[in-house]
Amino acid sequence: TDNSVKAVDPYTAYVMGYFTESPQGLANDYNFHLAYSTDSLNWTPLNQNNPVAIPTLGQQGLRDPFILRKQDGTFVVMATDLKGTNFSGPYSDNIHIWDSTDLRTFTNYRLLPMNAGGMHIWAPEAFYDASLGQYAILWSGNTDYNRIYVSYTTDFITVTNPQVYFDAGFGVLDATMHTHNGVNYMYYKKESNNSIYGAKSTSLAPGSFNTTTYTSAIAHDVSEAPIVVKRIGENKWNVWVDSYYPVNAIFYAWESTNIDTNSWVEMNKRNYNAPLNSKHATVTQITQTELNNLIAYWGDPNWNRIKSYNYPDRYLRHASFKARLDAYAFDPYQDSMFKQVAGLIDPNGVSYESVNFPGYYLRVTGSTYDISLSQNDNTTAFKETSTFYIVSGWADATWSSLKSYKFPTRYIIKSTNYVLKAQAVTSSSSATIKADATFKIVR
């Protein structure tokens, strides 16, 4: 939420918490991960996209993490006590809890009993209710159908017995809260159509959202786990939605300039980039000092991904040692990860070394100028054909095009069937060719 802990908004950046999954399970990691963003749209994983906290109690795995900044400015991290995808039970009566002053160290790890009486306790989130002087923990539970429950606490050590918080008369999951200008907004998943809706109320009391849904369906394929983010310094909001069908680990984003109205518009994927394989995330605003400290402590990734401008759901990958564009998410996901190093023939350029095939680089090969993944033989010819210059994107100067050192009129471009080649591009080339030769270097 944007319930302010301090009188003056000190925040300049954002941190995201998540776990990871991928279509064939190669990225499945049911631990706590972090990423950061300066614009809330484009995210950089911390700690090489490895976990920063690992649950060792209960089911020894987590889903649905949530970061709460408490009234004293420190953080609580909570998460579902569930490892993997065994959604049919038996269910844990606990949630995972960590305390943290800085999201660099996590202390007092514990299981918090929720007294749920055999219900599942999924997707815990929390907010401070000033009228009660307590924190409210919302979670998804079920009897005859799924409702949103609330348990109250002052210390995240003991909680009150649960009570129904939101009952719309049909199955709902994944409630998230946001407060703006004295109005409280709750976004949730409706199970019957796998879509997200928003409700609003000036009260935070249980039951106050039951009949206040004000948006139409927000959905892309099977949608869940909404996140509402106010962009710092802007009159703009985003709703991030997790989609797990037809493949998992895909986020979609919507935008609005007025959260109080039914005015959400789905964004073009060119405009955002979620952390690699991230699932069911949480976003919290942080200060510049906190951001600097997180990067210094956890480090930026030593790898990049290359995203297509013309097909922004697709990323450059190698498959059978040929470079192509494939729709994310896919496995092996490491096929899309490259270390961007100084150009092998000219340090003013760049070369791209495969993460999962160390010593292999993208290069121009053959009479058809294919972009292939080849092992470095340390010859001049290899170094020349594997060096590129990052220049302003042909279709968008805020993006990039990759110009061949060896063939200076040729650029990496999408060709037939999404295969990549080095092809001549000039100012008189078609708009499609220019777009096919434009990319964004992301993490």
Image (cartoon, grey):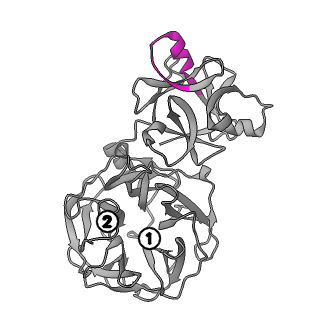
Q: Which residue is mark 2?
A: 79
Residue 405 in the figure: left or right of residue 435: left
Foreground: disc 1 or disc 2: 2
Q: Is residue 387 magenta?
A: yes
Q: Position of residue 184 (x, y in %)?
A: 48, 79
Query: Residue reaching furthest right?
Result: 428
Assign a secondary structure to mark 2.
strand
- State the residue in front, 147 or 184: 147
Question: Magenta part of the protein: which range?
Answer: 372-389
Assign a secondary structure to mark 1.
loop
Residue 158, above or below 378: below
Tell me the quarter of the picture where residue 15 sits. bottom left
The Cα atoms of the two marked residues, 1 and 2, are separated by: 17 Å
Q: How many marks?
A: 2
Residue 281 in the figure: left or right of residue 95: right
Q: Residue at x 35, y 78 (%)?
A: 141
Q: Are marks 1 and 2 in contact (CB under 8 Å)?
A: no
Q: Position of residue 95 (x, y in %)?
A: 26, 69
Q: Residue at x 36, y 51 (%)?
A: 28
Residue type at mark 2? Ala
* Disc 2 residue crowd, few under 14, some 14–19, many 20+, Cα 10 Å: many
Q: Is residue 346 magenta?
A: no
- State the residue in front, 159 or 220: 220
- Whichever of callouts 1 and 2 sits on the residue coming sooner in the sequence is 1
Tell me the quarter of the picture where residue 332 sits. top left
Q: Position of residue 391 (x, y in %)?
A: 62, 31
- Residue 44 visible (yes or no): yes
